[in-house]
Amino acid sequence: MASNPSLVMRVLSASVAVSNRASNIIRNVLTKGDLGIVEKGKNDLQTEADRSAQRCIVASLHKQFPNVAIFGEEQLDPQEKIPKDFIEQGFDAEVLKHTCPEYLKETKDEDVVIWVDPLDGTAEFTQGYLDHVTVLIGISVKGNAVAGVIHQPWFNFDKPGLPLGRCIWGVIGLGSFGFERETPPANKIIITTSRSHSDRMVTEAVEACNPDEIVRVGGAGHKVLLLIEGKVHAYVFASKGCKKWDTCAPEAILHAVGGTLTDFHGIRMNYSADVQRKNTGGVLATVANHEKFLSCIPEHIRDCMDKSSEAPPLDFKGVVVCGGADLKEAKKDSATVPDKNPTIDNATGSTSSNAETNHKEPSDSVPNEYGNTKL
Ligand code: AMP
Ligand code: MG
Ligand code: MG
């Protein structure tokens, strides 16, 4: 174990441990069979799994770090009695073997905000697309997403004999762990986007990137897993629907391996306690070529998206944002984004291309290897 672990490494280590407990709780809700679905808003569901997982994560972390701000997605009664077996007080030993990056060593309680999405991909959960589900615990320092956990409770559900579930964690400056990094295919462009919160603008933004394939799956966490595993090149979501708890952990884990997550103006999100919860600038995440994907987005779509308030940057000087695989190789091998962007006819709103020969009909099917298998 690293001697005298820093606050950030202790919070991260506790978050890994509690995500394992939350993941069990989520699986148990499904096994019992009563999902207890509540409609929070239009196209916005909550289940007993969301509620119970949040109770477990927030109560456990609050007990261990009483002076750290924690925001969970679900509005729950703070007076509620939490079952004893929902409280996890352990630390993940593997995380504590690592030394905290220098720039985070002096972090104090008041610098930290933890963003909790107890169950990302609720719509898919209720429909039986279980491998889209993740538990997200993001750790921000002075407004910057710096570390996080993405736990996937039903990873390997289709491979009997292999352990069910996995936990991916990362810190900017250390790298991300718990998965195999692959480079995305070099000769085509694959874009992932929402499966259940799509509309005309979401689709138009995706198509403006001239994809060969569109992968529509649930959850911000799951989509960023596809990115870091090299299954897609970009996550494009021209919508104001994603919230800070959806993007904090994925952003940190992606950034830790050299990727980028911003709004549609190229601005990194601010995760301070006082920010608005919605990511009203949209979400664009890439493993490489971020600027090129940004430049594909038509002006009128960018204009519909707000400019996010940027976090005052931490001193990332000297931080190596590479883990799991050689980043230079990853960038070299990644696909080239077309330079000639399709243009938009503002009068009709229809898409026309000034690069006819470049235009491709994307396949909008979702291959099984992306885990769109219903249980
Ligand atoms: P999706 O890619 O549709 O799974 O969305 C990623 C995350 O953002 C999930 O937690 C969704 O619940 C949330 N989200 C996206 N769009 C909306 C929306 N229109 N209303 C409510 N939540 C949304
Ligand atoms: Mg979510
Ligand atoms: Mg959620």
Image (cartoon, rainbow, N blue to C red):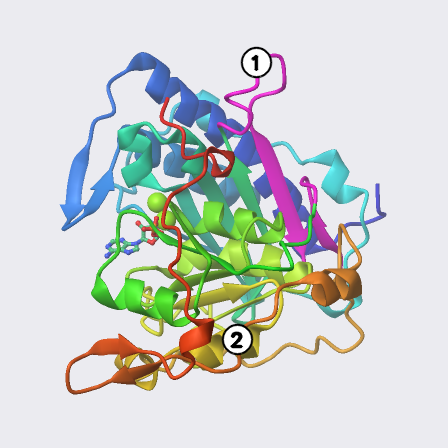
Is residue 352 one of those drawn in magenta?
no
Query: Along the line of sight, which residue is nearer the eye, 23 or 366?
Result: 366
Query: Could you classify mark 2 by the number of other residues whose Cα lies within 10 Å: few (under 14), some (14-19), or many (20 or more)?
Result: some
User: Main SS of the magenta segment?
Assistant: loop
Residue 43 percent location from the top left of the image: 18, 48
Q: Amino acid at mark 1?
A: Pro
Q: Quadrant of residue 130?
A: top left
Q: Nearer the viewer, mark 1 or mark 2?
A: 2
In this rendering, position of residue 301 left or right of residue 38: right
Question: Which quadrant is the C terminus positioned in?
Answer: top left
Where does the image place residue 177, in percent across and percent down from the top left?
Answer: 70, 45
Residue receiving disc 1: 160
Q: Residue at x 48, y 23 (%)?
A: 24
Write the start and end of the magenta stretch as one range: 154-180
Point out residue 116 in the picture as x, y percentages from the top left corner.
Answer: 44, 49
Q: Quadrant of the N terminus?
A: top right
